[in-house]
Image (spheres, rainbow, N blue to C red):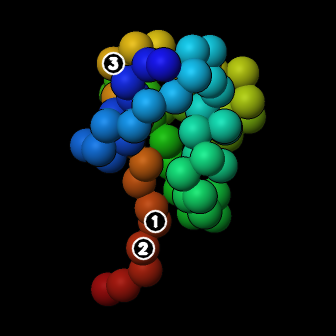
Amino acid sequence: MIHIKVNNTTHLFKPNTTLDEIIKGLDISVNGIAVAVNENIITKTEWHTKTLNQSDEVLVIRATQGG
């Protein structure tokens, strides 16, 4: 198992887990979000191929409305 930090909370995943699998596994709604891995934005089309490594840091940012 590898340790991946998602929004400052550490989770355990199998090696070679994709970003898409992590988002689905943590039940994160994909509507209106942007995702960065180690401070690099990952486009939604790349989520299914982007594999994560030990100690990677994932940041999920949700768009909000307001004014």
Q: Amino acid at mark 2?
A: Thr
Find residue 51 and report its horizontal and vertical position in percent. Answer: 60, 18
Choose mark 3 or mark 2, whichever is in front.
3
- Please rate how many residues cluster around mark 1, counting C-alpha atoms within 10 Å: few if below 14, some from 14 to 19, many from 20: few
Up/down of 33 relative to 49, above or below: below
| Distance from the alpha carbon under mark 3 to that under mark 2 | 28 Å
Residue 46 in sight in this render = no
Mark 3 or mark 2, earlier in chain: 3
Mark 3 sits on what residue?
55
Quarter that holds the C terminus: bottom left
- Please rate how many residues cluster around mark 3, counting C-alpha atoms within 10 Å: few if below 14, some from 14 to 19, many from 20: few
Mark 2 sits on what residue?
64
- Please rate how many residues cluster around mark 2, counting C-alpha atoms within 10 Å: few if below 14, some from 14 to 19, many from 20: few
Mark on residue 63? 1
- Whether residue 42 sits left or right of residue 62 in the image: it is right
Q: Amino acid at mark 3?
A: Ser
- Residue at the image position 60 percent from the left and 32 percent from the top: 19
